[in-house]
Image (cartoon, rainbow, N blue to C red):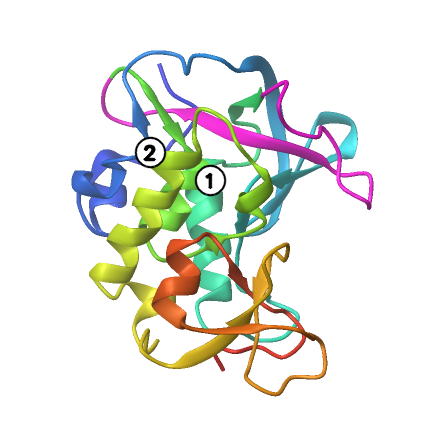
Amino acid sequence: MGCSSSSPDTHRKEGSQRDFQFSYHPQPPKGLLLEKHTVDHVYDGDTLTIENRISVRLLGIDAPEISENEPYAKESRDYCRKLCPRGGTVLLGFSEKNERHDKYGRTLAYVYVYHPSKSGYICVNMALVEMGLARLYKLRRVKDENTNAMREAQKKARREKRKIWKKVNEDNIVVITHNGEAFHRVGASCVVNASKVTVGEALDQLYAPCRTCKPLG
């Protein structure tokens, strides 16, 4: 059974089945409430709509912005569309530990699809991170069954210099605050009382790059 009309070879063109090292689940994910829905439209790598045009924001990740013409933005959207084609089935996963909606009213969820070539499921959020087509976002406040796997998926993408990580120098110095979610450029006006760390250290602690000062360039 599957929600995608694309063949396994289509997915292998993006890399190989090892791309699903962390995002593949042979059984339905435990600890999450799962709801079955139909895909209406994928807008970018981290946002889609389901039936009745309900907007879903993929929990814990941030994909490159198409509106800002960021590198790999279209590739991220297209990969999400391959996994979640219009009319296909997705399972939205919710944890009691996480908020169900963001400040814009969008549903926050892990999105699962049936694996295209064998039994089991793929977590789309995690697959995008593994491919280097999205980074972790606000995961410091998400403490559920997927947190550790999401962290490892990003470490893998960083280590292999995939896509968005290709030109990132993790030895560069940035600043963080203890209670913050993001890391910033040194001297940025969007942060005060900050401590200096390397980009790699900030990422290891699940900080995300600030959207205002854009410390990764």
- Comparing 215 with 91, the one in front is 215
Q: Residue at x 24, y 43 (%)?
A: 19
Q: Amino acid at mark 2?
A: Ser
Compared to residue 173, the image places residue 11 above or below, namely above
Mark identifier at residue 187: none
| Location of residue 145 in the rendering, given as x and y in whole percent from the top left corner | 44, 24
Compared to residue 40, the image places residue 171 above or below, namely below
Residue extending farthest to the bottom is 187
Q: Residue at x 63, y 41 (%)?
A: 48
| Location of residue 36 in the rendering, given as x and y in whole percent from the top left corner | 58, 15
- Are circles 1 and 2 on residues that touch, CB within 8 Å? yes
Numbered marks: total: 2
- Comparing 24 with 79, the one in front is 24
Quadrant holding the N terminus = top left
Q: Is residue 117 magenta?
A: yes
Compared to residue 147, the image places residue 168 above or below, namely below
Q: Quadrant of residue 33?
A: top right
| Residue pointed to by mark 2 | 23
Kindly report the secondary structure that dominates the magenta region of the rendered protein.
Answer: loop
Q: Which residues are magenta?
A: 95-118
Q: Secondary structure at mark 1?
A: helix
| Location of residue 187 in the rendering, given as x and y in whole percent from the top left corner | 61, 88
Q: Is residue 60 magenta?
A: no
How packed mark 2 is, by other alpha carbons closer than 10 Å (few <14, some 14-19, many 20 or more), is many
Q: Secondary structure at mark 2?
A: loop
